[in-house]
């Protein structure tokens, strides 16, 4: 009756959901929701927290993400979610065992599967090695003629390379090149 007379009174010191960094993961529905958000964000917990609670500061996002990563309720739900999608450890081991079975098969009808399995295993097990070859020299056609037009023929270059090193100011240096 008092509530009707006074109207709905908000609770003191209570933040709304988006600006609170607290997540009730003991509730299975909340843990399932958080796990789904983490999986949808490619296991990037901070990105999932920013999506779930957009009003948190970056420090609060990092703190909340760290807590959720260690939370056993969330981890259990993540494993269930991954298992539903066929992305858990058991499915990964099954896939790898299939690849090895096809790669080692000697049946003629499995030839295409064998080649594909070898390609997949090769990419997974052997890191792509980048080989750097020595760069080839690039011959510049007409370089000598261009240097002659600029006044940097063989005679000028040889004179400059044989001249003793002196402290020339910029005007004297420019005059030397304008010869």
Image: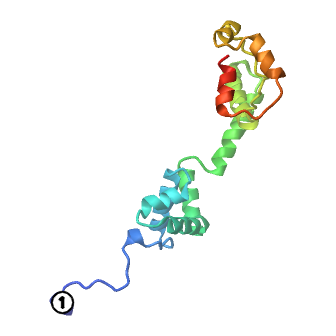
Q: Position of residue 115 (x, y in %)?
A: 70, 23
Residue 59 x, y percent position in the rendering: 53, 67
Q: Which residue is mark 1?
A: 6
> Is the residue 175 above or below the residue 73 in the image?
above
The residue positioned farthest toward the bottom in the image shown: 2
In-image side of 69 versus 143 (left or right): left
Residue 179 found in image quarter: top right
Estimate the x, y position of residue 82 in percent, counting from the top left: 56, 52
- Which residue is located at x 64 percent, y 30 percent? 171
Q: Which residue is painted at 63% across and 46% down in the image? A: 91
On screen, 161 above or below 63? above
Q: Residues within 10 Å of mark 1 (few under 14, many from 20)?
A: few
* Colour logic: rainbow
Residue at the (34%, 86%) spot, across then down: 12
Pick the residue in front: 16 or 29. 16
Q: Quadrant of the N terminus?
A: bottom left
Q: Nearer the viewer, residue 135 or 85?
A: 135
Instruction: Provide the secondary structure element on which disc 1 rests.
Output: helix
Between 23 and 166, the one nearer to me in the picture: 166
Q: Quadrant of residue 13?
A: bottom left
């Amino acid at each position: 009756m008092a509530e009707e007379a006074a109207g709905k009174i908000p609770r003191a010191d209570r933040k709304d959901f988006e600006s609170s960094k607290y997540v009730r993961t003991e509730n299975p529905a909340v843990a399932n929701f958080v796990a789904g958000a983490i999986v949808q964000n490619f296991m990037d917990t901070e990105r999932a927290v920013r999506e779930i609670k957009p009003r948190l500061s970056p420090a609060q996002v990092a703190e909340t993400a760290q807590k959720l990563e260690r939370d056993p309720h969330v981890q259990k739900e993540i494993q269930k979610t991954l298992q539903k999608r066929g992305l858990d450890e058991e499915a990964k081991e099954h896939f790898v065992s299939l690849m090895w079975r096809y790669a080692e098969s000697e049946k003629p009808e499995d030839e295409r599967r064998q080649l594909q399995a070898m390609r997949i295993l090769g990419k997974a097990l052997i890191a792509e090695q980048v080989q750097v070859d020595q760069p080839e020299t690039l011959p510049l056609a007409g370089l000598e003629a261009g240097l002659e037009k600029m006044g940097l023929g063989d005679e000028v270059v040889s004179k400059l390379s044989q001249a003793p090193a002196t402290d020339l100011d910029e005007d004297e240096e420019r005059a030397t090149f304008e010869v």
